[in-house]
Image (cartoon, grey):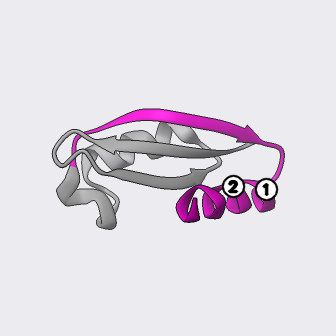
Amino acid sequence: MFYTYVLKSKKDNKLYIGFSSNLQKRFTEHNKGLVGITKSRRPFELVYYEACCDMKKAVEREKALKTG
């Protein structure tokens, strides 16, 4: 399974949208500062996620969420 997810920064209240095959691990990486693009915006809360059967669909959903 692949997951498309939305994180909300508790620091600036902005959203970050991504996808991963291991949502729990990726969420932990974001909050530990191991993801460069979100490092300065920690901590995060997970506000939404959805499961997809394959990576292609997860990437498509990520793009759809980013473009509205």
- Neighbour class for label 2 at 10 Å: few (<14), some, many (≥20)? many
Q: Secondary structure at mark 2?
A: helix
In the orientation shown, which residue stands out farthest toward the front? 68
**Does residue 53 belong to the magenta stretch?**
yes
Q: Is residue 53 above or below residue 37?
A: above
Q: Dividing the image into 4 quarters, which one contains the C terminus?
A: bottom right
What amino acid type should be assigned to the residue bearing mark 2? Arg
Looking at the rendering, the stretch of residues picked out in magenta corresponds to 42-68
Whether tag 1 and tag 2 are in contact, CB under 8 A, the answer is yes
Label 1 vs label 2, nearer the camera: 2
On residue 61, the disc is: 2
- Is 24 or 42 nearer to us in this picture? 42
**Does residue 39 belong to the magenta stretch?**
no
- Is 8 or 23 nearer to us in this picture? 8
Q: CA distance from mark 1 to mark 2?
A: 6 Å
The answer to which image quadrant residue 57 occupies is bottom right
Residue at figure coordinates x 40%, y 43% from the top left: 7
On residue 57, the disc is: 1
What amino acid type should be assigned to the residue bearing mark 1? Lys
**Picture coordinates of residue 39, whole percent (x, y):** 24, 58
**Picture coordinates of residue 50, whole percent (x, y):** 66, 37
Q: Is residue 58 above or below residue 1?
A: below
Q: Secondary structure at mark 1?
A: helix
